Image (cartoon, rainbow, N blue to C red):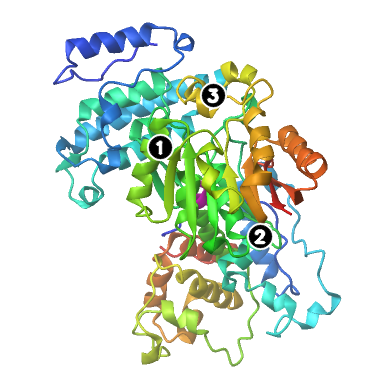
């Protein structure tokens, strides 16, 4: 599915999804996120907390951000969870009651809204013809939103791109081994995983496409084309760049 | 409201059909207790299964969509305000689904200006959408199917359209240990939705008996069972509740039912799609809505084997509380682990439990 950043059915409710200390880029990132939120939910954006850490945050988590074994690091890998595990972190509801009962409960409603408790991210789907399918669609959207919104701090010294990122790179990348397999495009569900890793890197270099391209063994042009191939990826990168005073990619 | 075609209809309605359509439209709809099926569509297969024997230009279909959309936008606010009917947003989604069912998917890939293949005449699309808006004919009867879980079930007038919340019954069954090999009963199966949903998960030895009093329901359920190739897993039986199940009394691993549970006095206040078009037999649960539910509760003790599971859908909250009370107190010697389960709208919609 090619997710469109501006499509309806996606609401960002709060910003409780940074279970690790805020790195340098966080303030500008938060501004970008707030800007994102402002066109999805104009009414609430002014009242949103700036960054609200989860209540369960462990005080020791300050040292855990780079430790793969920690709960904090695991929780930022939501999109690696199985459908069942991810659903278990969500509250699901419909918008209205359905069933053929009395006046207030006779509304047939197959639309579904998923609220991801750890991050407050909300994804919904109305366009499928069964509740079952709307739930699956909302879950797919939630994964994309998590990829777009949940940032993991990375250590640029000695950075090696994870395999899911290599998989979305074009074949001409010099760091992409032959064993990586064919390039995964935006319509593949696995694209979200690579997109998340790519955004982690782009945010770590504060929006510089040329620096990111260098680290991925690509020309700036080739990386730009990859970013522009997916609407939601392009919007997210451009919001970051605009917040840094850089020209948006087009 | 006057509805007009935006262009001269090339093949006008046959005069007899036109007059009968007009007659029906001019009758105040509340007075019709059992709706007459629209035109000749009743005996035809659902839209999506018909051969694409007709053609229309892209422009023609575009004009239809624009006309239908303007009708939806004009009528939506009125329908949702009057009796909780569909709003404009839902009607527009239904319109997209109607076009999806009426056209051939592959044709949408072909170039601009080409002819599209249709499963109905373009003129009939106009008539169908008018019936949707003017007569409040349920969308699912118009296209002849309902998408439920990952199934596409055939439905038609005379059979209750399966509801989204009932999808959960299948999930409840899937949690029962060893369900795959048990004997199950879906009482009042209607279109066969629950039976087909369960039937697909069963393994060797597993079986569903799906009963209904209505011959129309059984005919539709048969179509759905056949479409999903479940004839060896689902046995359809005609009769009232437990009557057709005497031979398996005490042997059932599970009883499932979405019985009629609406209090009689609520029927006139239902949204027109439900109250005027769906079968009363499948809706009306008697004075307090619990006539059939109580019968099911009482019959479960002898129908289920020891350790057997039941899941019944109710009108929600008060009814569910009453049934939990009944099953755990008065019938507490027979049942245990009685629970209420909410649907996704937050209504306590299901009661489940086990035979001791």
Quote the CA–CA distance across marks 3 and 1: 33 Å
| Residue to which mark 2 is pinned | A31
| Residue to which mark 3 is pinned | B80
Q: Nearer the viewer, residue A9 or B253?
A: B253
For the C terminus of chain A, the quadrant is bottom left
Residue A174 appears anywhere in the view = yes
Residue drawn at (65%, 40%), measured in percent from left and top? B299
Residue A37 placement (x, y as % from top left): 62, 52
Name the quadrant containing residue B44. Answer: top left
Q: Are marks 2 and 3 on the same chain?
A: no
Residue B69 placement (x, y as % from top left): 37, 29
For the N terminus of chain A, the quadrant is bottom left
Q: Nearer the viewer, residue A26 or A152?
A: A152
Graded by Cα atoms within 10 Å as few (under 14), some (14 to 19) or many (20 or more), the crowding at tag 2 reads some
Q: Are marks 3 and 1 on the same chain?
A: yes
Q: Magenta stretch containing residue B35, yes or no? A: no
Numbered badge on residue B178: none
Q: Is residue B22 left or right of residue B309?
A: left
Q: Which of the two discs, 3 and 1, sits closer to the camera?
A: 1
Residue A125 appears anywhere in the view = no
**Which residues are drawn in magenta?**
A130-134
Q: Is residue A110 left or right of residue B96?
A: right
Q: Are marks 2 and 1 on the same chain?
A: no
Residue A127 placement (x, y as % from top left): 46, 45
Q: Tell me the subunit letter for badge 1.
A: B
Q: Nearer the viewer, residue A166 or B34?
A: B34
| Residue to which mark 1 is pinned | B218
Dot placed on the residue nearer the N-terminal end, 3 or 1: 3
């Amino acid at each position: 599915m090619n997710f469109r950043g501006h499509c309806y059915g996606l609401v960002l409710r709060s910003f409780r999804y940074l279970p690790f200390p805020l790195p340098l880029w966080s303030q500008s990132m938060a501004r970008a996120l707030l800007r994102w939120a402002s066109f999805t939910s104009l009414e609430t954006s002014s009242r949103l907390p700036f960054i609200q850490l989860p209540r369960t945050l462990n005080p020791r988590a300050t040292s855990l951000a780079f430790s793969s074994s920690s709960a904090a690091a695991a929780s930022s890998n939501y999109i690696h969870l199985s459908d069942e595990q991810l659903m278990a972190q969500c509250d699901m509801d419909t918008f209205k009651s359905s069933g053929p009962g009395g006046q207030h409960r006779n509304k047939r409603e197959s639309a579904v809204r998923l609220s991801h408790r750890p991050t407050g991210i909300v994804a919904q789907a109305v366009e499928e013809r069964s509740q079952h399918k709307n739930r699956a669609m909302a879950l797919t959207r939630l994964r994309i939103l998590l990829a777009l919104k949940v940032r993991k701090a990375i250590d640029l010294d000695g950075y090696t791109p994870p395999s899911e990122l290599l998989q979305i790179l074009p074949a001409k990348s010099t760091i992409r081994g032959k064993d990586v397999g064919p390039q995964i495009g935006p319509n593949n569900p696995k694209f979200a995983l690579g997109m998340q890793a790519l955004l982690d890197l782009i945010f770590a270099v504060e929006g510089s496409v040329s620096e990111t391209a260098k680290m991925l063994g690509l020309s700036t042009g080739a990386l730009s084309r990859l970013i522009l191939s997916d609407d939601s990826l392009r919007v997210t990168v451009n919001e970051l760049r605009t917040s840094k005073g850089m020209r948006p990619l087009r | 409201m006057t509805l007009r075609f935006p262009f001269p209809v090339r093949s006008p309605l046959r005069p007899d059909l036109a007059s009968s359509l007009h007659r029906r439209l001019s009758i105040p709809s509340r007075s019709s207790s059992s709706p007459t099926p629209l035109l000749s569509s009743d005996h035809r297969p659902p839209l999506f299964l018909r051969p694409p024997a007709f053609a229309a230009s892209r422009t023609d279909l575009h004009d239809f969509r624009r006309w239908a959309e303007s009708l939806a936008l004009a009528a939506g606010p009125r329908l949702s305000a009057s009796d909780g009917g569909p709003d404009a947003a839902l009607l527009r989604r239904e319109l997209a689904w109607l076009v999806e069912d009426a056209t051939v998917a592959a044709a949408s890939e072909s170039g601009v200006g080409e002819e599209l293949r249709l499963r109905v005449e373009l003129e009939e699309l106009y008539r169908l959408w008018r019936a949707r808006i003017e007569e409040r004919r349920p969308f699912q009867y118009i296209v002849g199917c309902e998408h439920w879980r990952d199934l596409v079930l055939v439905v038609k007038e005379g059979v209750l359209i399966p509801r989204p919340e009932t999808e959960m019954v299948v999930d409840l069954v899937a949690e029962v240990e060893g369900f795959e090999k048990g004997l199950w009963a879906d009482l009042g199966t209607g279109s066969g939705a629950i039976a087909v949903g369960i039937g697909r998960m069963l393994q060797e030895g597993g079986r569903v008996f799906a009963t209904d009093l209505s011959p129309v329901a059984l005919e539709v359920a048969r179509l759905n069972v056949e479409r999903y190739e479940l004839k060896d897993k689902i046995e359809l039986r005609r009769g009232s509740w437990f009557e057709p199940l005497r031979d398996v009394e005490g042997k059932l691993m599970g009883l499932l039912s979405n019985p009629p549970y609406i209090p009689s006095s609520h029927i006139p206040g239902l949204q027109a799609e439900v109250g005027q078009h769906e079968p009363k037999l499948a809706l009306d649960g008697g004075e307090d809505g619990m006539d059939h539910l109580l019968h099911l509760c009482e019959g479960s003790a002898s129908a289920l084997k020891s350790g057997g599971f039941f899941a019944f859908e109710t009108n929600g909250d008060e009814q569910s509380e009453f049934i939990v009370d009944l099953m755990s107190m008065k019938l507490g010697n027979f049942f245990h682990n009685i629970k209420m389960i909410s649907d996704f709208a937050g209504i306590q919609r299901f009661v489940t439990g086990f035979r001791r």
